[in-house]
Amino acid sequence: MGAIFHMRHYGQATGLDRHDYAQWVLPLQGELQFEMEGRGGRLDLLQGAFVAAGEAHDQMAEGPNGFVIVDCGPGVLLCAAVEAMPGQAWSVARMAAFVGISESRLHAVFRREFGLSPQAWLSASRLRWAKHQLRVSQASISDIALAAGYSEQSALTRALRRECGQTPAAWRRATPNAAEANRQ
């Protein structure tokens, strides 16, 4: 499941709800009395909420109200975390624990959503991130390789050669960077 957006209006409390996906609750109008795992609070234009997968929650509103609800399957949150920190040690066990599912379920989700294993997706994500950094950053190729999660620059070189037939230096030279594009 990717991210699914809903527009909702609330009335009286309907009882505790729990689902196997995470959810963002973003107020657009009105206030929402919100209870999550026994803790109460109020959501308004300045205060939204994140509901982790499996957390019990209930809500109630009076008067005109409207909320954007973003349902996020496990893949969405994990992908965002990996893309923000590609150099972290993202083992399959760590990725599964991050989203609160088993390793076998993680494999099934990645096969369904991306047609890849989690490790193959991770490798592609790291290379995509490194290629972007080569394009927009002045950081050294070695620093980019390490930040992307490669053990050394030569590992990035092998991966980029395999995918694009170029070394990182050649990729950087052949690809106009954002700073140059903005000057033109």
Image (cartoon, helix red, strand yellow):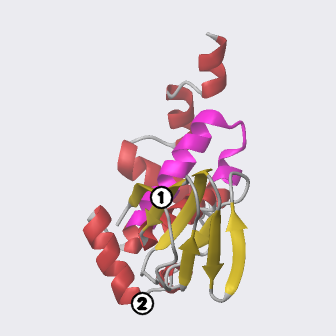
Query: Looking at numbered disc 2 in the image, what kind of residue is underneath it?
Result: Ser
**Which of label 1 and label 2 is nearer to you?**
1
What's the magenta region? 121-144
Residue 102: mark in rendering: 2
Quadrant the N terminus occupies: bottom left
Q: Residue furthest front?
A: 63
Q: Position of residue 180 (x, y in %)?
A: 63, 19
Q: Left or right: 100 with respect to 161?
A: right
Q: Position of residue 124 (x, y in %)?
A: 42, 58
SS at mark 1 in the image: loop
Q: Is residue 141 visible?
A: yes
Q: Which residue is mark 1?
A: 9
Residues at marks 1 and 2, CA–CA distance in whole angstroms: 34 Å
Query: Looking at numbered disc 1 in the image, what kind of residue is underneath it?
Result: His
Query: 154 and 147: which one is in front?
Result: 147
Residue at x-position 71% and y-position 68% = 42
Residue at x-position 63% and y-position 62% = 85
Residue at x-position 38% and y-position 61% = 2
Q: Residues within 10 Å of mark 1 (few under 14, many from 20)?
A: some
